[in-house]
Amino acid sequence: MNDNEHTKIKFFSGEKIPLEMHKARMVQRIDLLPIEERLNAIDMAGYNTFLLANKDVFLDMLTDSGVNAMSERQYAAMMMADDSYAGSETFFRLSAVLGDIFETRHFLPAHQGRACENIIANIFVRPGSFAIMNYHFTTTKAHIVRLGGSVVEVVYDEALSAESDRDFKGNFDMNKLETAVGEVGIGNVAFVRIEAGTNLIGGQPVSLSNMIEVSNFCRDRGIPLIFDASLLADNLFFIKTREAEYASWSLADIVKKMASLMDIIYFSGRKLGCARGGGIMTSNDEYFNRMRPLIPLYEGFLTYGGMSVREMEAMAVGIRETLDIHIISQTPLFVEALGKLLLEKAVPIVRPFGGLGCHVDASRFVDHIPQEQYPAGALAAAIYLIGGIRGMERGTLSEQRNWDGSEHLSAMELVRLAVPKRVFTLSHMKFVADRVGWLYKNRDLIGGLEFEEEPDTLRFFLGKLRPIGDWPKKLAAKFISHMPSGM
Ligand code: F0G
């Protein structure tokens, strides 16, 4: 199959919609509760969408993590798993697939992406050291900070503007990288980290030519380069379709080139490979030997690393399927379709359309809510209330407080409506745009939130908040006045 085939099928009408190159053979029933029950559910959840029970959710767009639809080949592979504590055949099969695709010599299994981050941080981060990266991810930063390190971010200023539609907003600003290394001193750089499909700035990709520049920079200076490949699938699609220089390259060759630039590659297998787990790859014997003893300590024996062998088999197939343009195009094409529908309703979203999900720009949607009152958190709660749609806050609430207890105001206030692969249909996207479009017209009714219970670490997962005033009730009443069924 030709990698560019997905662009060949066209509608006579000229309409551009994501045509599914798969069919559904197993489905899950979902229900939309009436708004009175949704009001109760979000109140019980402390206005935190992480704390909603799935039975109260209609469209679960919280994340793509561990919830992508799997292929029949992945399910078939699960039946062949070799259950054993040590020396499982499954491990050798998965290692061989990874070695083949990434051309790395060593693979260390771990139970998910953040477990890899824990192990890598333990090896490289010392109190007072700095990890320089395009942008942080929540769990990445938490592990670095826990060990006394700091994160320095070097994306272009424009990357933090939702309105700028520059391609490859995940790219490193090489001037900023050079300045950062100069300022902290090479000896204090723990590592440089490239995050594919940069999550917190809207699933924005990094170009292959930028990866080459960063790699040359690090190799010249002997700085370890770490690649977070969790969102590799989306990033790969964007390199293939937006980076002219590599348009004729096969996906397999693009991945091999990318991997050859890095010292360590890690991934969340809940994202990459559409299964559940994670792992670290390297060809560097020294790094491998330092990380290896930590796997049995934190994860599980070296041949399963905390994963079920069935998931490992599914992951091996899923990662191979990442080299199929029909599979990796699914999320970006649906994000684009949803994005266009939202733009028709003037809803402010991050441009250009990225991977992972559609990112609503709360700083423009609810510009009357100050950042200290968590505008993106309030908007995520309001989107659930009016549509039963569960998105995720990606703004100040997802930040950690500074050492002195003051708020660390996020550079962007986003609500992510994630689009897991092959899970939703176009009519689901139309429903989302319809409800979020209505909410945008009634946005003045949305108010802020304040903490009721605030955990010290990763507070967005378990924190409970309350609305400032009774805006959720007023918003629900307005919704019913326009939609008497309450659905
Ligand atoms: N790196 C990136 C870029 C991620 O997006 C994630 C997870 C991780 C690391 C951590 O992996 O969850 O397997 O421990 N992202 C999920 C999300 C949680 O919803 O975006 P994990």
Image: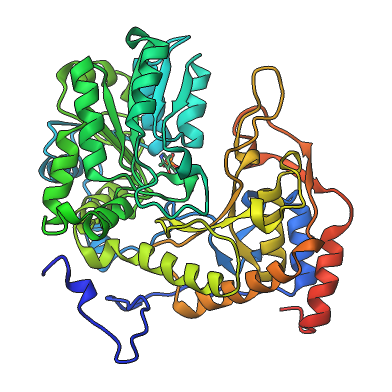
Q: Is residue 155 above or below residue 191?
A: below
Q: Residue furthest right?
A: 469
Residue 248 location, quadrant: bottom left
Q: Is residue 247 above or below residue 105?
A: below
Number of numbered discs present? Answer: 0
Using the image as rendered, state which of residue 123 and residue 41 is in the foreground.
123
Q: Position of residue 295 (x, y in %)?
A: 32, 25
Residue drawn at x 72%, y 71% is 441
Q: Is residue 52 above or below residue 138?
A: below
Q: On the picture, is 389 further left or further right than 128?
A: right
Residue 462 location, quadrant: top right
Residue drawn at x 34%, y 91% is 13
Q: Position of residue 409 (x, y in %)?
A: 65, 34
Q: Position of residue 398 (x, y in %)?
A: 60, 39
Q: Residue furthest bottom?
A: 12
Instruction: Report the quarter where the N terminus lies.
Output: bottom left
Color encoding of the figure: rainbow
User: Is there any visible trace of residue 298 in the rendered image?
Assistant: no
Instruction: Report the quarter where the C terminus lies.
Output: bottom right
User: Is there any visible trace of residue 253 in the rendered image?
Assistant: yes
Q: On the picture, is 135 further left or further right than 465?
A: left
Q: On the picture, is 401 further left or further right than 307?
A: right
Q: Position of residue 175 (x, y in %)?
A: 35, 27
Report the image quarter containing ligand 1. Answer: top left
